[in-house]
Amino acid sequence: MSDPPAAAKARRPGTVVAAAVLLALGAAQAVVFAISGSAESGSPAVFGMLPWWGRLLYGPLFVVLALGVWTGRPGARILVLVLYGVGAALAVIDLLQADVSTGLTGLIWPAVFAILLNTLSAREWFGVREPTGSANPGSAV
């Protein structure tokens, strides 16, 4: 394993702490719901279709993601954003199937993680370099 980026040795941004804590809480929630045999309301359709042991695997996945976010691993940030992007796509499908409450609930967490992990301080934490080039990055010239 490689060392985390140099930013990981600096002070951890609050948005990164919040994302890591939410992922750890998600791990605990996934384990509790898997053991109890219930799927929470607003969970992705995939979660409800899995057997209890398949849902139980979400716990360790979320722990690994939380640790990756906590330590500043760039791959963890990308994986969290991709997984929650897939969750957002499933939520849109729920919305299109007239399941408004599940669809709207399913859009909340992807939006939260997109905001938390795309702040300037979070991107610096993960070693994401800002593009260089034009003085006005918003211009299309």
Image (cartoon, rainbow, N blue to C red):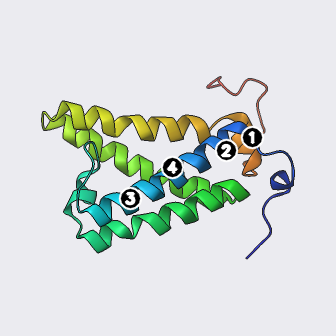
Indicate which disc residue 30 carries.
3
- Looking at marks 3 and 2 on the same chain, the residue that comes earlier in the sequence is marked by 2
Depth-wise, is mark 1 or mark 3 nearer the camera?
Answer: 3
Tell me the residue that label 1 is attached to. 13
Q: Is residue 129 visible?
A: no
> Where does the image place residue 76, in percent across and percent down from the top left?
60, 59
Q: Is residue 23 visible?
A: yes
Going by the numbered disc 1, the residue's amino acid type is Pro
> Where does the image place residue 100, in percent across and percent down from the top left?
19, 31
SS label for mark 1: loop
Tell me the residue that label 4 is attached to. 81
Q: Are marks 4 and 1 in contact (CB under 8 Å)?
A: no
Distance (Cα) linking label 1 and label 2? 5 Å
Going by the numbered disc 4, the residue's amino acid type is Leu
Going by the numbered disc 2, the residue's amino acid type is Val
Indicate which disc residue 74 carries.
none
Q: Give the quadrant of residue 47.
A: bottom left
Of 123 and 24, nearer the camera is: 24
Specify the farthest residue to the bottom.
Answer: 1
Of 86 and 134, nearer the camera is: 86
Tell me the residue that label 2 is attached to. 16
> Where does the image place residue 63, in percent across and percent down from the top left?
54, 63
Distance (Cα) linking label 3 and label 2? 21 Å
SS label for mark 2: helix
Of 8 and 89, nearer the camera is: 8
Distance (Cα) linking label 4 and label 1? 18 Å
Distance (Cα) linking label 1 and label 3? 26 Å
